């Protein structure tokens, strides 16, 4: 995945424009939260079930 363009909400070939934008936003959230989990310590965040 190209991390230079995670902030770009764009059309993805093969999907409708609305679904493409949704997928772009979901990819951003996935990458953002994965980076956050890497930087945080287990004790610094609350337990989520």
Image (spheres, rainbow, N blue to C red):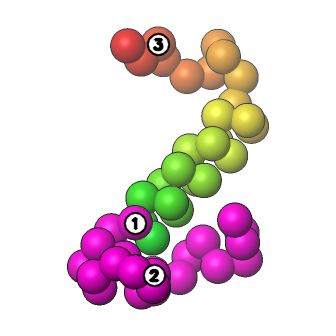
Q: Which residue is mark 3?
A: 47
Label 2: few (<14), some (14–19) or many (≥20) C-alpha neighbours in 10 Å: some
Percent across and percent down for residue 5 are 64, 79
* Left or right placement of residue 6 versus residue 41 in this view: left
> Is 43 one of the magenta-colored residues?
no
* Left or right placement of residue 21 versus residue 30 in this view: left
Which of the two discs, 1 and 3, labels the residue nearer the N terminus? 1
Q: CA distance from mark 2 to mark 1?
A: 8 Å
Q: Quadrant of residue 25?
A: bottom left
**Which mark lies nearer to you, 2 or 3?**
2
Q: Residue at x 42, y 17 (%)?
A: 48
Q: Is residue 21 visible?
A: no
Q: Which residue is mark 2?
A: 12
Q: Nearer the viewer, residue 46 or 35?
A: 35
The quarter of the picture where the N terminus appears is bottom right
Label 1: few (<14), some (14–19) or many (≥20) C-alpha neighbours in 10 Å: some
Whether pointer 2 and pointer 1 mark residues with C-beta atoms closer than 8 Å, the reply is yes
Q: CA distance from mark 2 to mark 3?
A: 36 Å
Q: Is residue 24 above or below residue 12?
A: above
Percent across and percent down for residue 15 are 34, 78
The quarter of the picture where the C terminus appears is top left
**Which mark lies nearer to you, 1 or 3?**
1
* Left or right placement of residue 48 versus residue 4 in this view: left
Spot the residue most to the front.
14
Q: Which residue is mark 1?
A: 23
Q: Nearer the viewer, residue 14 or 29?
A: 14
Q: Residue at x 45, y 85 (%)?
A: 13
Q: Nearer the viewer, residue 34 or 15?
A: 15
Q: Which residues are magenta?
A: 1-23
């Amino acid at each position: 995945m190209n991390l230079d363009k995670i902030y770009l909400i764009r059309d993805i070939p093969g999907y409708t424009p609305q679904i493409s934008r949704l997928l772009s936003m979901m990819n951003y959230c996935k990458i953002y939260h994965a980076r956050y989990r890497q930087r945080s310590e287990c004790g610094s965040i609350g337990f989520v079930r």
